[in-house]
Every structure is written in C-alpha cells, then in structure tokens.
Image (cartoon, helix red, strand yellow):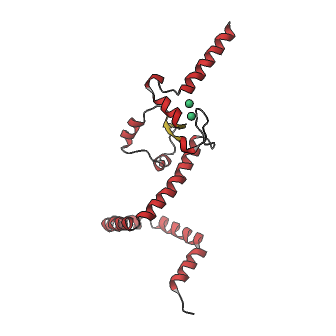
Amino acid sequence: MVFDKKEYNKKYKQENKEKLKEYSKNYRKENKEKIKEYRKENQKKIKEYRKKWNQENKEKKKEYNKKYNKKYKELVYNHYSNGVIECACCGEKEIDFLSLDHIYNNGAKHRKKIGKTISFKWIMKNNFPPIFQLLCMNCNFSKGKRKNNCKCIHQIRREEKEKRKQEEEKE
Ligand SMILES: [Zn+2]
Ligand SMILES: [Zn+2]
C-alpha cells in the first residue's frame, strides 16, 4: 500500500480534533503578541488572501453564514424570551412571524448611533442589551402605529379591560 499523506493527515486531524483545538487555542494565547505583529505586518496579504478566498468560496461562505446566523438567531431569541420563544405580547410561537423589536421604538436612532444594522452577532458581542423584545409581525406593526403610542392594540385592549374591571369593582 502506498502511504497516502493527505489521507493520513485527514485521519489524524479527525481523531485528534479536541487535542488540536486545545493546542491551537494555547498557541494563540501564548503567542498573542507575535500573532498581532504578524497580522500587522501582513495586513495587505491577509486581506487579499481573504478576498480571494471569499470570491472562490462564495457558496461555501453563504452556507456558513446561513448556518451561523441561524445559530445566533436561536441564541438571541432564546435570551430575549427567557427560553420560551414566543411573542412577548400575544404568545405567537411561529418563529417565522417573530422578530426582534426595540422596546422603546427607537430602532432608527440606535442604528444611526452604532452606524450599521444591528446583527445578532452585534447583540451577542454587546452582552444582550436589555432594549429588545421578541414580537410577532402583527404586534410589531400595531405597536409602530403612531396613534397607539408604542403599545400594541392587544396591550391597549388589556389595559382598557383592566380599567373597566377596576371601575366595576368600585361601584
Ligand atoms: Zn404578537
Ligand atoms: Zn400584541
């Protein structure tokens, strides 16, 4: 049998996945400055390489982004709904109908401040700021209407009902 180096390497990598991961992590930790230096010196080269890789692997990257976006989305949604993914207002559970909502309706202002659209990654990087909630499209739409003053019509009805109940109890 001919010794197949490529196959051998592949097998070795597979069998020692954790070990290699640990090793590379330690290496990065111990050589932080060296790596930083290298990156600085080879900035252009790295950028070009990355650009080339991106061009050649468009599909792969798309797939990769999709996979990670899904993962991030799940993490973020879980965080803002305390593990039960549903609309904070009406309880809609269909994830296709749900999206993140700025509690104080200041999304545009916030986007301007951080200078880009808010991604799941950004939210994670910034330790899940407590300015979001999970809302379904309907509740989101209703809350955004000027006449409703930052409240979903569900919420307004609930408050009306509560008020009526209190008045009835008074009588
Ligand atoms: Zn809803
Ligand atoms: Zn609602």
* Quarter of the image where the C terminus is located: top right
- Residue 106's place in the image compared with 6, above or below, is above
Q: Can you give x and y, in whole percent of width and height, for residue 27 in the image?
A: 49, 69
Q: Can you give x and y, in whole percent of width and height, for residue 108 in the image?
A: 39, 36
**Viewer-side residue, 77 vs 140:** 140
In the displayed structure image, the side of residue 121 where residue 165 appears, left or right: right
In the displayed structure image, the side of residue 43 where residue 131 appears, left or right: right
**Viewer-side residue, 119 vs 148:** 148
**Viewer-side residue, 36 vs 20:** 20
Residue drawn at point x = 50 percent, y = 48 percent: 124
Labels in figure, total: 0
Most distant residue in the bottom direction: 1
In the displayed structure image, the side of residue 167 where residue 10 appears, left or right: left
Name the quadrant containing residue 16.
bottom right
Residue drawn at point x = 49 percent, y = 37 percent: 101
Most distant residue in the left direction: 44
- Residue 116's place in the image compared with 31, above or below, is above
Residue drawn at point x = 48 percent, y = 49 percent: 125
- Residue 76's place in the image compared with 141, above or below, is below
- Ligand 1 occupies quarter: top right
Q: Can you give x and y, in whole percent of width and height, for residue 94 in the image?
A: 59, 43
**Viewer-side residue, 19 vs 63:** 63
Residue drawn at point x = 48 percent, y = 24 percent: 148
Most distant residue in the top direction: 171
* Quarter of the image where the N terminus is located: bottom right
- Residue 161's place in the image compared with 29, above or below, is above
Q: Can you give x and y, in whole percent of width and height, for residue 112 in the image?
A: 36, 39
